[in-house]
Structures are given as structure tokens and as C-alpha cells.
Amino acid sequence: MKLTTILALLAALLLTGCEEITQATQSKEETAVEHAVKHLDPNYVCPMHPQIIRDKPGSCPICGMDLVAVENEPDGDVTVEINPALVNSLGVRTAVAEKGRLWRMIDTVGYIDVDASLISHIHLRTEGWIEKLYISAEGDRVSKGDRLFDLYSPALINAQEEYVEALRSGNQRLIRSSRDRLKSLDISGDQIDALKRTRKVSDAVTYYASQDGIVTSLKTPEGMFVKPATRVLSLVDLSRVWVQVEVFEQQANWVAVGQPAEMQLSFLPGRQWDGEVAYVYPELDARTRTLRVRLQFDNPEEALKPNMYANVRLYAGPRDGVLIIPSQALIDSGREVRVIIDQGDGRYAPRKVAAGMQSGDFVEIVSGLDEGDRVVVSGQFLIDSEASLKASLQRMQGGE
């Protein structure tokens, strides 16, 4: 039984008088304590599942825990008066309910991924041998146009010879055909033009980087025989990265492509990256009931590495003209939500409210408050306890 309930019972004992209690005990009639308990009319609730409420003791049908008695909530018209000096010592602070803009903010976590559009996998269109590598190991950085490797391939040599013979013959149809064959074998236009000028066939054809990037998946040392199915290497550009996050099902319709996003990393406190929603996946995860969302962030310094974890905040659109208060002003008992209203001159009263969307440190109030009402945001739980005790005493006195 709560302390406030015990105090209420003691007050009931004092009101009835010792003589009445003695007579009631001797005659085994209803005592004042029993009478006070009836007027308190406690409900019984599960500590783990507050939605389970009963009018008598028992056990929770969900977890099996014993139900515990709780007092009725204070009536809305109960007023508590506190000396102004005590208000200061208790650290009571207030805030005004006002209309304004409330963002649908989503706080979540995610991991950094490579932007798939900035990956190049190098495959050949013919078989041959890697004659020379111009990169030493994975992790080497290359720029677009840098040499990657030389390939010796009989098919490439034959294609070059056919093109040279076509040029000597002057047959334009044959020249176009042999040139197209070189292109189909992934020989660049600049290399074909150089062959046209020099008419000199190269034993090894050089392959160049198609983009800036870092070398990954280098599995082909010099001298290795490779086929079209062999991935010679990959180039990854980290100047822009993806961040994969998940949002709850009830927030799924908030998110749209192009919305702003912020990201912070735990090991780099104080630094923030700004990005946007790049893609919203079309279906929910059936197991976790969450929706995957892909974000996009610029990464010019390459401080963001693949597989790093990140704290992310999405700004899923604002709502204007909503009544908002600090979320810390709410008192959630499990059965209802209320706030403490500052009525001025040291007078405070609890009031039931209906809370809506919560965003960061603020919450929308759907009903129960008017614009300009002042609510307590610090020390409200002490005032609420006092109001509960006062309401209990009023109910007892009214039932005598």
C-alpha cells in the first residue's frame, strides 16, 4: 500500500475517534479503517502491464504477477496551494502552452554503406594473362584515367591486326566492322585512334581506371590467367556514402524522398553530417515490423567508413499551428496522462490531457489545454502527489 494511502487511513482514524473504534472492534462491526478503504476505492493494476486494471486483488493474465493496489487519480478540480518561498526551494519551473511548428522527427540508428552507384567492377571481355600490374595492393588510391594493368591476349592481338589490315585496304565497311570489334572487346576510343595513327599492334593492351576510387577485391597477381567471369579488381569511391536505417511501422508514412537528415557518430562527438532521404524501400520487414530507408551523405574527407554505426535524425515534415508544451511536463500514470497547471499565487491543479505527436523535447497536446496555459515542467511530481493525497482525503470526508 502506498504512503499516501496509509496517511489517508490514519486521517480517517482521527476523524472517527478512539471510542467509536473500540466499540466497532468489540462488536466486530465495520471499522473506520475499513470504511475509509471503501471510500478510497482502490483499483488493482499489474506493475508490468498498466493496461490490466481490476477492482479486486488477483494476478495479471499476461505475466502472472500479483496486482497491486493504486489510488484513484486526483480530481481535476483539486487545487494545491504552496508557499512561494517553498516553490523556489522545490525548484518549480513552468512553461507556457503555445501554438507553433512541430517537426515529425524520427530518431534512429543505422550503418554506413558504400554508394553502389560509385562502385566499378573490372571484368574483361576476353581471356588473357595479366602481364603487368600498376597498383601494388588493395587500398591503393587511383584517379580516373590512371593505368591499372596490362593484358596479353591473343584475341586482342588478332583484333588489332584485322583493324590495321582494314585501314590498309581502305575498305570503309571493313574498317567500321573491325573498329566495332575492338570496341566490343573494351578497347577505348583513344587507344583505337592511336592504333590508327601508328598502325603498330601492341602485344599487351593497357586498361585504365574509369573513375576515381580506392582499389578493393584485388585477387589477380601478375601472370595470372583471367577470363571474362573473373573480377580483376573493384574501385570504390567514398566521396559519397549511403546510410541504411530503419523506422517503426507507425512512422512509415512520415518518410519521403528528399527530406533532410542529420547524422552523428559516437566516436566523433560534436560533429554533424547533413544529408537527405535517397530511397524508401517498398515493404516492411515482416519480423521486425520496421521500414528500411536509405539516406545519402556527402563524404569529401572520407571520414565516414563503410559499416560504421551512426545516430540519425530524420525531419519528416513539419506541422504548423499545433499546441505544444515541453514533453517533460507530462505525468503518465499508465491509465491517463495529465499535467500540473500553474494557476498563479502559489496555486496548482492537475489536469487530464490528451497527448499527440512527440518530437524531440516537445509534445503536441490534442485536448485538455488552451493556448497560454502555464504548465509545471520541474517539480510537478511532488505537486501531483500532494494533489493525490488531498483528493483522497476529500473523498473520505465526503463519504462519512
Image (tube, rainbow, N blue to C red):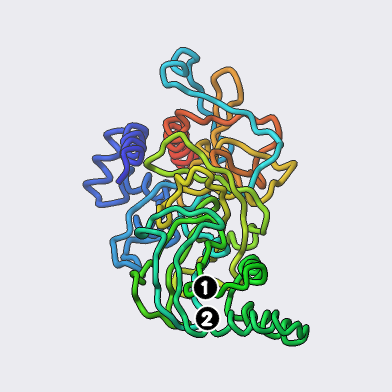
- Does any portion of residue 358 appear in the rendered image? no
Residue 163, above or below 220: below
- The residue to which callout 1 is attached is 202
Specify the farthest residue to the front.
Answer: 168
- The residue to which callout 2 is attached is 157
Callout 1, which amino acid?
Answer: Ser
- Does any portion of residue 68 appear in the rendered image? yes
Q: Residue 345 sits in which quadrant?
A: top right
Picture coordinates of residue 294, whole percent (x, y): 56, 60
Instruction: Indicate the secondary structure of the residue bearing disc 2.
Output: helix
In this view, the residue in front, 143 or 152, is 152
Instruction: Indicate the secondary structure of the residue bearing disc 1.
Output: loop
In this view, the residue in front, 354 or 143, is 143
In the displayed structure image, the side of residue 164 where residue 267 appears, left or right? left
Specify the farthest residue to the top.
Answer: 85
Q: Residue 11 sits in which quadrant?
A: top left
Q: Residues within 10 Å of mark 1 (few under 14, many from 20)?
A: few
Q: Residue 8 sits in which quadrant?
A: top left
In the displayed structure image, the side of residue 301 where residue 24 appears, left or right? left
Picture coordinates of residue 376, whole percent (x, y): 53, 30
Callout 2, which amino acid?
Answer: Ile
In the displayed structure image, the side of residue 17 where residue 288 appears, left or right? right
| Residue at the spot 67% in from the left edge and 71% down from the top edge | 196
Whether the residues at callouts 2 and 1 have beta carbons within 8 Å, the answer is: yes
Picture coordinates of residue 34, whole percent (x, y): 33, 48
User: Is tag 2's residue or tag 1's residue first in the polypeptide sequence?
Assistant: 2
| Residue at the spot 68% in from the left edge and 50% down from the top edge | 317
Residue 394, above or below 28: above
Classify the position of the C terminus by image quarter.
top left
